């Protein structure tokens, strides 16, 4: 700009187009961490519900690229990548060069988080804090999923009626359809970015229970808060999941979807024998039933 331009009050103002905050952790035993990350991918396909888990081939795939693209097996030279999106921003995680676990939050529009686009100290510090905290929340959520089993006292407090600050906290019964839908929805990665609200959580629960109402959501938010599973974000109508809440949500969801339901299906007496023989649990259960029936017959309890 010329001196005359400056005299008229014109000046430059830089804006933030994109900001990326990364967290790279190099373990002493990369193979073990890679195995852990691949288990995390499997976990979050069912629990975290990220927008996509993609396989990166190092090639650009467009609508003109011939062939049918789908994932069958993760082979040598193919890196699994976990991505979760929020508005124009995203967090992704992958195992970098076979040696390091890398977590990256990319903010493409500061307005997604209520931060201005002008490059100044206030906006810069706010965005770097958001990026750093998002990376930490993702890692914390994944670690909590690996050690989620509560002690008996904690479990009893959740599934039984209790009180919090003198106020009643209704029971959250394991296996109850509404409770399971609610806790499954709490596992969503969406909440890692901007917390959760009545509407954002209600939309997830309503996808599992048709007809779920705002009034029911208000009641459920109240009991989640009194059970210590969520807490209100100061100065807003949003909530955030506590560490205790994530562990309980993951424990209930994993136990219900990966142990109880599959096991009951395998123990179904109408399950065809050719299918039952492929299940160690079903084979053991049928052997137990046959042995019990034989003992009853030997005792002459039936004719």
Image (cartoon, helix red, strand yellow):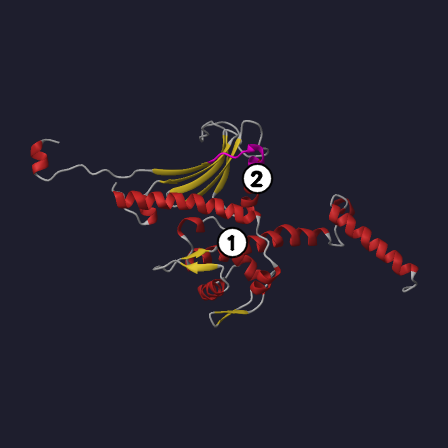
Q: Which quadrant of the view contains residue 175?
A: bottom right
Residue 258 placement (x, y as % from top left): 63, 50
In this view of the protein, which residue sits in the foreground, 79 or 213? 79
Q: Residue at x 30, y 47 (%)?
A: 115
**In the structure shown, which secondary structural element does the residue marked by tag 1 occupy?**
helix
Q: Secondary structure at mark 2?
A: helix
Q: Which numbered circle lies on residue 246?
A: 1
Residue 260 appears in the figure: yes
Q: Residue at x 57, y 49 (%)?
A: 147
> Separation of disc 2 and disc 1 at Cα?
19 Å
Q: Disc 2 marks which residue?
A: 36
Magenta stretch contains residue 171: no
Q: Residue at x 62, y 53 (%)?
A: 255
- Callout 2–callout 1 Cβ contact below 8 Å: no
Q: Give the residues drawn in magenta, as a range.
A: 25-34
Question: In the figure, 45 relative to 232: above or below?
Answer: above
Left-right relation of 87 to 283: left
Residue for point 81% across, 55% down:
289
The quadrant of the image that shows the N terminus is top left
* Residue 241: percent from left, percent from top: 46, 55
């Amino acid at each position: 700009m010329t001196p005359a331009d400056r005299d008229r009050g014109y000046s430059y103002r830089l804006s933030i187009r994109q900001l990326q905050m990364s967290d790279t952790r190099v373990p002493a035993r990369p193979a073990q961490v890679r195995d852990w990350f691949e288990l995390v991918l499997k976990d979050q396909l069912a629990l975290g519900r990220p927008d996509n888990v993609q396989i990166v081939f190092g090639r650009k795939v467009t609508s003109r690229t011939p062939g049918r693209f789908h994932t069958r097996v993760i082979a040598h030279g193919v890196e699994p990548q976990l991505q979760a999106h929020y508005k124009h921003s995203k967090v992704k995680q992958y195992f970098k060069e076979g040696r390091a676990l890398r977590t990256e939050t990319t903010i493409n529009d500061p307005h997604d988080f209520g931060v201005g686009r002008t490059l100044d100290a206030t906006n810069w510090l706010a965005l770097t804090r958001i990026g750093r905290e998002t990376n930490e929340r993702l890692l914390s959520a994944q670690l909590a999923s690996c050690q989620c089993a509560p002690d008996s006292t904690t479990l009893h407090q959740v599934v039984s009626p209790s009180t919090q600050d003198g106020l009643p906290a209704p029971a959250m019964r394991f296996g109850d359809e509404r409770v399971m839908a609610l806790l499954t929805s709490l596992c969503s990665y969406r909440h890692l970015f901007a917390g959760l609200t009545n509407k954002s959580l209600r939309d997830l629960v309503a996808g599992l229970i048709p007809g779920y109402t705002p009034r029911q959501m208000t009641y459920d938010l109240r009991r989640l808060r009194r059970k210590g599973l969520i807490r209100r974000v100061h100065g807003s109508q949003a909530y955030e999941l506590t560490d205790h809440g994530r562990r309980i949500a993951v424990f209930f969801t994993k136990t219900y979807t990966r142990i109880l339901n599959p096991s009951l299906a395998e123990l179904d007496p109408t399950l065809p024998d050719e299918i039952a023989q492929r299940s160690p649990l079903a084979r053991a259960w049928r052997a137990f039933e046959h042995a019990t029936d034989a003992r009853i017959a030997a005792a002459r309890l039936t004719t």
